[in-house]
Image (spheres, rainbow, N blue to C red):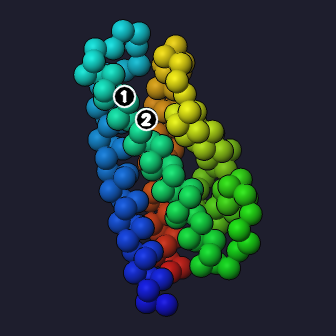
């Protein structure tokens, strides 16, 4: 059991670090704003934001929520099942938002058309606060049930 707690603590530390770097990028991009005609530096900031958004969403959905399900003795199921269970546990506020986050993460990973990148930037700016806010709930849940 100590090994499980140690692994959970490592995952939670990675979660907090990913949140902090996403928060930094989000605040920087809020100052820039989504627009047509980014400078190279601004474009680089938004590309870092989308990458960090995708990374934090993966950590939450693929690692932390899966870890919670294992510790709660839940069936594996699909990503949607995992997200729905997280909403029922009160770990995430809205399963619908997390489904949107997952879909957006997949778009980030597989999008190659320059003309759609601005739409992705706008969606990331809209959903980043949801993702950032969820980290506090995840940390609280882990302390309440697994410490």
Disc 1 designates what residue? 46
Residue 95: x and y, percent? 67, 50
Residue at 49 percent across and 16 percent down: it is: 114
Residue at 58 percent across and 63 percent down: it is: 65
In the figure, 19 relative to 147: above or below? Answer: above
| Mark 2 element type | helix
In the figure, 140 relative to 134: above or below? Answer: below
Disc 2 designates what residue? 50
Of 140 and 42, which appears nearest the observer? 42
Q: Are marks 1 and 2 in contact (CB under 8 Å)?
A: yes
Residue at 27 percent across and 18 percent down: it is: 40
Q: Residues within 10 Å of mark 1 (few under 14, many from 20)?
A: many
Residue 144 seen anywhere in this rendered image of the structure: yes
Residue at 52 percent across and 64 percent down: it is: 64
| Mark 1 element type | helix
Q: Residue furthest bottom?
A: 1
Residue 133: x and y, percent? 46, 50
Residue 97 seen anywhere in this rendered image of the structure: no
Q: Is residue 109 left or right of residue 83?
A: left
């Amino acid at each position: 059991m100590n090994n499980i707690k140690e692994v959970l603590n490592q995952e939670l530390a990675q979660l907090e670090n990913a949140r902090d770097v996403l928060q930094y990028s989000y605040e920087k991009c809020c100052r820039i704003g989504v627009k047509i005609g980014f400078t190279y530096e601004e474009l680089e900031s938004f590309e870092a934001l989308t990458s960090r958004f995708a990374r934090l969403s993966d950590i939450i959905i693929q690692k932390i929520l899966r870890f919670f399900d294992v510790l709660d003795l839940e069936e594996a199921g699909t990503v949607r099942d995992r997200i729905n269970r997280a909403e029922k546990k009160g770990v995430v506020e809205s399963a619908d938002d997390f489904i949107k986050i997952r879909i957006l993460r997949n778009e980030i990973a597989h999008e190659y058309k320059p003309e759609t990148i601005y739409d992705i930037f706008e969606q990331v700016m809209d959903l980043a606060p949801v993702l950032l806010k969820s980290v506090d709930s995840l940390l609280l849940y882990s302390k309440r049930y697994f410490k």
